[in-house]
Image (cartoon, coloured by chain):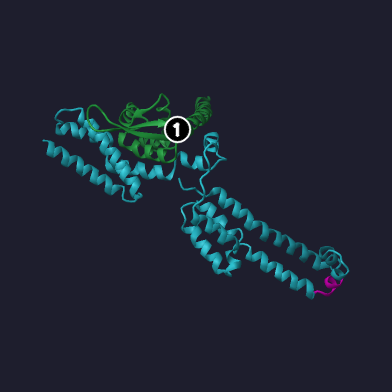
Amino acid sequence: MADVTTTRVQAYLDELDRALSELPRGRREEIVRDIRGHIEVALADLDNPSDAAVEQVLDSLGTPAEIAEAAYLAEADGIPDAAYAPETKYAPETAYEQRPRPRMATRDVATVVLLLIGGIVLPVVGWVIGLVLLWSSTAWRTRDKLIGTLLVPGGLLGALLLAGLGMVVVTSTGSCETSQAAGAAPATVCTSSGSGAVGTVIAISLLVVCVLGPFFTLGWLIRTARRPV
Amino acid sequence: MEPGQLLTHLRRGTLEYCVLAALRGGERYAGDLVADLGEDGVLVTSEGTVYPMLSRLRRDGMVDTTWRESRSGPPRRYYRLTRAGEAAVRGFTEQWQLFRNAVDRVLSEEV
């Protein structure tokens, strides 16, 4: 009888283990161990558990597939997201603030640095490496990864190129050059020549976006990164 | 929508707080907690599904666990709320009352 019981329970646990195969090993082992403990305690109260008793315990636990589904759901949602995002109402802010905020993983630090200045240090390639690290990381959600990618592609490289381009344009435009020599601010100088003024305003706004964008992204990614626990 | 399916949807986002709330009285053995939650068959239909949730809550710092020897049988895993867990229950209780009142109000309106 006892052997049959063990076999039945072991088959159930094996099936559960297989159903949980998509989970990281540690989590899978914890759940299987907890379920095993539940069964052992439930059967320990009975002197000589009958097959029917075993079936009843397993029945009330649910099928391995059901437990696995709950496990995958628990990974996908729940309190954690609220706890990680302090702006959410459910977030137990006070309790979390009392703990020291864990440091970001080294890899994630490298990611944000590469995204910001990688494109300058190692032209374009550096930023692309940062991008690969960003998208392969589990520290950010897709939304954050999109922000990291699109605001602003290339990081500060764009601002640098734009500034360089601006210098070329300004020095090659006659009117602006003379006024600059007179000591006036270039922006005011170029207003004298109609379409050039609009161009300057656009260029300056673009430059501001290209400088502030990457820094906003930097702050955003640091704030939203999940810290190692 | 099937009644069972509807309940499944309603449990999502609620059950974990019920698990936390069931621990407000102090430390409990997982098996007792699970049996308690599964008693009416509304919150939990299969007791085993609570364990993955407890695992997640532990990793998120909402509960702490301790293994304790038992006079009869194998060691048992006990769970208790952390301060973060207590705060989460308080926050949920507030929001739940607002939510429940809003739903009740709409449902009880004369058609």
| The N terminus of chain B, quarter of image | top left
| B71, A180: nearer the viewer | B71
Q: Residue at x 44, y 42 (%)?
A: A77
Q: B33 or A70, which is in the foreground? A: B33
Q: Nearer the viewer, residue A176 or A102?
A: A102
Q: Is residue B110 left or right of residue A45?
A: right
Q: Secondary structure at mark 1?
A: loop
- For image coordinates 31% across by 45% down, the residue present is A29
In the rendered view, does A221 fall on the left or right side of A38? right
Chain corresponding to green in the figure: B
Observer-nearest residue: B67 or A48? B67
Q: Is residue A57 above or below residue A218?
A: above
Q: Is residue B46 visible?
A: no
Task: Name which residue lies at 52% across and 62% down.
Answer: A131
Give the residue type that dot 1 points to.
Thr
Task: Give the residue displayed 51% in from the left and 65% down from the top.
Answer: A129
Q: Position of residue B40 (x, y in %)?
A: 33, 26
Residue A211: image x %, image y %? 67, 59
Q: What's the magenta region?
A: A173-178
Whether residue A38 is visible here, answered yes or no, is yes
In this rendering, the answer to whether B74 lies above or below A220 is: above
Please, what is the dominant secondary structure of the magenta stretch? helix
Q: Position of residue A31 (x, y in %)?
A: 32, 41
Please give the residue where the numbered disc 1 appears in the rendered image. Answer: B82
Q: Position of residue B23 (x, y in %)?
A: 40, 28
